[in-house]
Amino acid sequence: MKIWIDQLQKEHTLPSKAYYKLLTCSDADSMEYLHRQAKEVSLAQFENKIFIRGLIEISNCCRNDCLYCGIRKSNIHIDRYRLTQKQILECCQQGYELGFRTFVMQGGEDRVQSINWIENVVKEIRHQFPDCAITLSLGEMSYSDYKRLFDAGANRYLLRHETFNPTHYNQLHPKEMSAQHRQQCLLWLKEIGFQTGTGIMVGSPYQTIDHIIEDIRFIERLQPEMIGIGPFIPHHDTPFASQEAGSVELTLRLISIFRLMFPKVLIPSTTALASLGNEGRLKGILAGANVVMPNLSPSNTRKKYSLYNNKASLGAEAAEGLKLLNMQLQTIGYEISMERGDYKG
Ligand code: 5AD
């Protein structure tokens, strides 16, 4: 196994059968070696610095009905909200004072917050915070809408492909959605010039190791600047309520594989990983992640943005908890960086 890990570190790719072996290996020493090599690569690229992004959840209204997601359209048990432009700018101001230099606006595919409205919010943030990066995570749009948002001043876009395999994609999404269209959106985002993030949920229902290898190959072709990997966690008001959560170990393994494939890529230690407990946040960093995204949303809306059960939004997960986060990072020899943290290819 070590030979494959060394080869991945040197050549940044492996034959599929080697990925299969890595993903299914049960030898603890080999896995420790994988994480250690990934951590070394991350330290060589970013030193012991962790970039922070302020996450603003702008709306939990969504026109889609993804089977895994707590804010899906047909969930009638959640309290829907939309932030106003004023509230979003207040979040940015508060974040700026705390030291954030990247704001991530994430939300459901809410068409009430129209493209005009989003474009204006982006322009206003760009105007008031000229030194900050603006990241959007607002789902699928047309090429021309993405272009408008880029021209308005947005720099980065997060859109997980969720799963490359079309059959698996259809098992997770309503019939109006397709793997092909999701992937098309990602190609558009790259073409327009966004620093583009994609990724998957680990352990989503019906996922197989072969699916994950297809995801690795897709990511290899796309060459994203950011890769978000988190475990699937069931939400009680979805059709997947009684499914098992994804594995933390497999999530960490993928983080390490992607770090060795793409030394410079930005990889968050995700909220989903932290939400499963047992210091998931720190384990992600020790496996090669170099970004955390504390929650900057107004505190009264945080619990309403419930993508899955027990989603963490307090303590080191919250923007106000930066000191706590930094203390936790220090226990493993890392610290927060106040830089903007753009992808440096
Ligand atoms: N478990 C884990 N991650 C989820 N997401 C949505 N629902 C869940 C869930 N139940 C992730 C998706 C989406 C991102 C914003 O949140 O991958 O792209």
Image (spheres, helix red, strand yellow):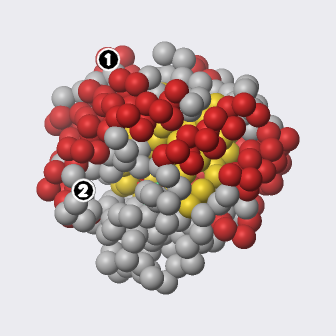
Indicate the quadrant of ligand 1 in the picture.
bottom left
Residue 238 sits in quarter: bottom left
Which of discs 2 and 1 lies nearer the camera? The answer is 2
Task: Specify whether tag 1 is near ligand 1 (CB below 8 Å).
Answer: no
Residue at x 22%, y 48% (from the top left corner): 179
Amino acid type, callout 2: Met
Report the quarter where the N terminus lies: top left
10 Å crowding of disc 2: few (<14), some (14-19), many (20+):
some
Residue at x 72%, y 31% (from the top left corner): 127
Residue 235 sits in quarter: bottom left
Distance from the alpha carbon under mark 2 to that under mark 1: 35 Å
Q: Return the residue found at the far bottom.
A: 77
10 Å crowding of disc 1: few (<14), some (14-19), many (20+):
few
Q: Which x, y percent locates residue 185?
A: 32, 39
Amino acid type, callout 1: Glu
Looking at the picture, tell me which residue is in the foreground, 220 or 151.
151
Residue 333 sits in quarter: top right
Give the label on residue 177, or none. 2
Give the label on residue 11, or none. 1
The answer to whether 123 is drawn above or below residue 297 in the figure is above
Task: Determine whether, in the image, residue 129 is placed left or right of residue 284.
Answer: right
Would you say residue 291 is visible in this rendering? Answer: no
Looking at the picture, tell me which residue is in the foreground, 230 or 71.
71
Looking at the picture, tell me which residue is in the foreground, 306 or 207.
306
Q: Which x, y percent locates residue 246?
A: 38, 62
Would you say residue 247 is visible in this rendering? Answer: yes
Residue at x 59%, y 69% (from the top left corner): 81
Looking at the picture, tell me which residue is in the foreground, 181 or 342.
181
Give the label on residue 21, or none. none
Residue at x 46%, y 28% (from the top left corner): 194
